[in-house]
Amino acid sequence: MIYHWDIRTPPAAQDRFRAGIDDAIILPLVLIALLARTLYRAALLIVPLAFDFVFALFLRMMTLPLLVAIVAGDAMAWLSKRLAGLRPLPEAAHNARRDRVDRDWSALRQRMSHAAVATAAQGLLQGRISWVFQTCRALSPRAALLVIAGAMLWLPVSAGISIAMHAVLLAKATSWPAWAQLLHPLATVIAKSKLLVLPAYPAAWPQARKHAWVQAAFRGMHRLAALDRIRKTAHRYRQTKQAFAQVRDRLQRAASFVWRIFSSANRCLPRIRSGAGFRRNMR
């Protein structure tokens, strides 16, 4: 049985939360909670952009060696056609060989294009995400909790590995060969790989929440939420949130009113100038 909890304050109990000395501690906590909520919502907007950036960087890293392979393939196709022309064969056989080389290389070249690689990588990524959700759905609560713990542990580990790689490469830039500096993009991909484990959280959570430890944490939070100070803090949080929403709406209306005034003034200014010029001409 999954335990649910709610800290909403009943309407009858809201009158008990009068101003007191404890508000000196509650109000700063409420402001910090509102700031954390704002940062969380901003992070929800930034994470898809960062994921798109990592995906584009991954495509660039994949297409760079493919570009080199395409150039080498063009050279090999040209060389093979030239070498085929040196052999003592009939003209029809030479033409057939050149046409076959052009046809085979053109088909392979299309598969190595940036659009083809992007489509294949996107399909592979979507397939992996679907596999993650299907696999995590079949996990036991303990295994799902370990998956979430491993994903959370990878966040600092990936950052540490990336920072260490960048630091070592910069420190050994003069003593190591020049090609070693090409490992900087690899360190960047390792740092951004934390975004690739994000699907593990929503995929494993439905099973992980059934674990006894998670249910015990829910029960402890429910008991904590039943305290008067916590209910008062929740009530002050809702009051502060409503106050900020009202201030935001008033600022939006004021900005809209000022914008309409400026727009009307900009439309009327040419008419005023034309009227003044007409009066000067009449004099």
Image (tube, helix red, strand yellow):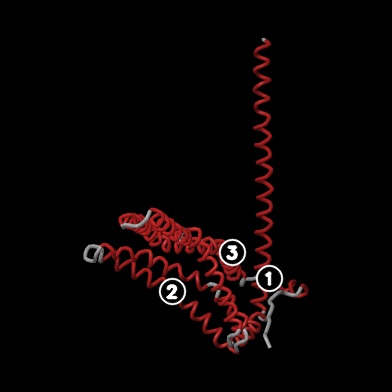
Badge 2 element: helix
Q: Position of residue 57 (x, y in %)?
A: 45, 61
Nearer to us in this view, 74 or 52: 74
Badge 3 element: helix
Mark 2 = which residue?
156
Q: Residue at x 68, y 15 (%)?
A: 279
Quadrant of the image containing the N terminus: bottom right
Q: Residue at x 59, y 75 (%)?
A: 202
- Alpha-carbon distance for marks 2 and 1? 35 Å
Q: Residue at x 53, y 72 (%)?
A: 198
Nearer to us in this view, 147 or 215: 147
Q: In the figure, is residue 205 to the left or right of 92?
A: right
Badge 1 element: helix
- Seen as rendered, the residue at the extreme front is 90
Q: Earlier in the sequence, mark 3 or mark 1?
A: 3
Q: Earlier in the sequence, mark 2 or mark 1?
A: 2
Q: Position of residue 149 (x, y in %)?
A: 51, 81
Quadrant of the image containing the C terminus: top right
Pointer 2 and pointer 1: residues touching (CB < 8 Å)? Answer: no
- Seen as rendered, the residue at the extreme top is 283
Mark 1 = which residue?
235
Q: Position of residue 81 (x, y in %)?
A: 36, 56
Q: Residue at x 67, y 45 (%)?
A: 256
Disc 3 residue crowd, few under 14, some 14–19, many 20+, Cα 10 Å: few
- Seen as rendered, the residue at the extreme left is 175
Nearer to us in this view, 237 or 94: 94
Three-letter amino acid code at the position of disc 2: Pro
Mark 3 = which residue?
41
Three-letter amino acid code at the position of disc 3: Arg
Is 6 situated above or below 212? Answer: above
